[in-house]
Image (spheres, rainbow, N blue to C red):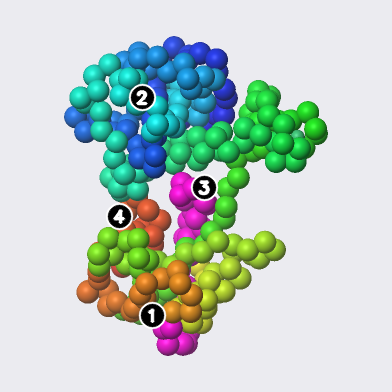
Amino acid sequence: MEPIRQLHDNFKSQSKLIIFCDGKILYDHDQKTYCFDVKDLNSLSDYSPYLSIAKNSISDEYYYSINIDPETNVLGIFMDPAKIEFTDFRTTLSFLDPSDFQLISRASILVNWKATNQFCSSCGKQTVFNLSEGAPDCDCHAPPRYPIISPCIITLIHDNDRILLGRSKFFPPNMFSTLAGFIEAGENAEEALAREVMEEVNVKVSDVRYYGSQSWPFPSQLMLGYFCKYEEGDIQLNDAELEEARWFDLDDLPIIPPDTSISGQLIRSYISDRSKL
Ligand SMILES: [Zn+2]
């Protein structure tokens, strides 16, 4: 899949469409897909020009994404409204495979980017999509408005056979996850990690090891995943971000995030490979 950012006045032939509405995504449970053939939909002219987000260079299929306004006649878009079902976006991500996860994340980030860059933030004029830059532009010479990605750290704090996990009040009951936070201006990732851990749970850590990264579309983060080793300090919740944080023995874990999220991957990787750290 080749990532692209283009606006098209009409759909290219062999187009697929990913549809969001009010924080939810359209998912066809029968066909197990969130990519719909444009030919199966009624008029979408209200959403022109259409945002293409990726192209399959083998099949030549273009992937488009739109965000339907819940106030408009959503059902009118579908030839068979009885079959449509919007599902919670976060829930959908939990059962996607990695390549689908990446495509859906990209779709969500780019529809938000298109919606929030209709006007120039320097002079207030309406922007024009610059095809060569693949971004909204303004004749006031402000830089083109590329998608903004926010870097965050996410880390598993370990101490031999136990790991420190926290839960926000938005999690399902008994689900705990690794700690995460935004990198501040001027900070490097390791400094952000030490600061976030101290701010959130009052614990000092060391031996920071990089694991990998993941795009996270809530709304547009790049999660940089690390392991880190517990040094000292008793858990104390210092800000309002976490509802609870605890040490868990590896053989007595709570519900943890799915493997599609980097949090779930960090925890499972530590369980299976901790001797390598
Ligand atoms: Zn401007």
Quadrant position of residue 61: top left
Left or right: 250 as drawn, with respect to 195: left
Q: Kindly tell me whether mark 1's CB lies below 8 Å from ligand 1.
A: no
Find residue 107 and report its horizontal and vertical position in percent: 46, 35
Per the image, the residue denoted by label 3 is 220
Callout 3 environment at 10 Å: few (<14), some (14 to 19), or many (20+)? many
Q: Does the residue tagged 4 have its C-beta within 8 Å of any atom of ligand 1?
A: no
Asked whether residue 205 appears in the rendered view, the answer is no
Mark number displayed over residue 216: none
Q: Is mark 2 within 8 Å of ligand 1?
A: no
- In the displayed orientation, state which residue is furthest to the right: 141
- The image's mark for residue 159 is 1
Numbered badge on residue 73: 2
Compare marks 2 and 1 and give the one earlier in the sequence: 2
The amino acid at mark 1 is: Asp
Sequence-first tag of 1 and 4 = 1
Q: Give the magenta-colored segment's residue range.
A: 210-236
* Disc 1/disc 3 C-alpha distance (Å): 31 Å
In depth, the one of 86 and 8 nearer the eye is 86
Secondary structure at numbered mark 1: strand
Q: What's the CA distance linking mark 1 and mark 4?
A: 22 Å
Q: Tell me: residue 58, above or below residue 235.
A: above
Residue at image coords 38%, 33%: 70
